[in-house]
Image (cartoon, grey):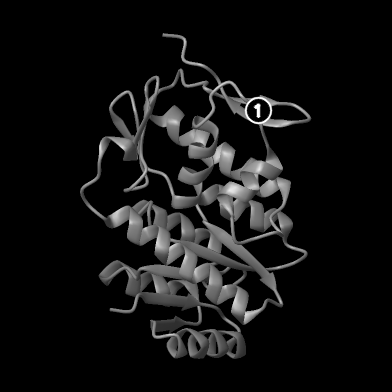
Amino acid sequence: MAGRVAVVEDEQNIRDNVAFALEREGYRVSSYGDGVSAWEAFQRQLPELVILDILMPRMDGLELCRRLRSLSESLPIIFLTSRDEEFDRVLGLELGGDDYLCKPFSMRELLTRVKVLFRRAALGRETGGSAEELMTVGELELDLRRYTARWRGTVVPLTVTEFMILHALARRPGHVKTRDQLMTEGYPHDTFVSDRTIDSHIKRIRKKFLAVDQGFERIETVYGLGYRMTESRS
């Protein structure tokens, strides 16, 4: 069955065009012109993916994203933003957005990103799995099928993009991953992600691990190069 997508955008022309393109691809679409009406609907039933404008009346996209993350850490969220709104874009990623597109954007590019996020989410929902699909690096355990992470046995709720970036670091502890390498692994379909996007995701990953372990310091910044996961000290 086709996925359920919510389009939250105050510009009717954009909202209608995006909804039409998604419906033509077989998705079930709900459209909202402001954050308040979307939030009221989402409290009754969450969609499976949200396309979310940042600047909107009544409730902006950043506040709506914050509220959505209080209900679900795994819900894929794509932000729509103007090119001159870098601060809001970065803040949106820090709040838990998986991806973003700058206006004006290619509808084909948007559809590609929607498909990628649905594919990742589907992998995360699958059950079963073998030992090869579990990665253990010291106190960190990554389930590569379900896209879930545990630190010292406690689940750390990550978005899919955050999981992919963490996985890239965990595969080779002690080795530096440049921002370009993390962009490639976290956004394999996108060649226009900025360094600040990766920095925002790393900041959010650290914050989530610190929430379950105040002494967490395994993700190290290597200034001028990128990031690395330090070797286990056990």
Taking depth in this image into account, of 2 and 68 the one nearest to the observer is 2
Q: Amino acid at mark 1?
A: Val
Q: Residue at x 72, y 46 (%)?
A: 195
Dot 1: few (<14), some (14–19), or many (≥20) neighbours within 10 Å?
some
Image-based side of 20 in relation to 5, left or right:
right
Residue 2 falls in which quadrant of the image?
Answer: bottom left
Residue 19 at x, y percent in the picture: 49, 86
Taking depth in this image into account, of 153 and 67 the one nearest to the observer is 153
Q: Residue at x 52, y 56 (%)?
A: 97
Query: Taking the image as drawn, is residue 64 in sight?
Result: no
SS class, disc 1: loop
Can you name the residue that lies furthest to the left here?
Answer: 128
Image-based side of 17 in relation to 6, left or right:
right
Label tally: 1
Residue 198 at x, y percent in the picture: 64, 44
Can you name the residue that lies furthest to the top here?
Answer: 234
Residue 83 at x, y percent in the picture: 75, 66
In which quadrant will I find the N terminus?
A: bottom left
Residue 155 falls in which quadrant of the image?
Answer: top left
Q: Which residue is mark 1?
A: 176
In which quadrant will I find the C terminus?
A: top left
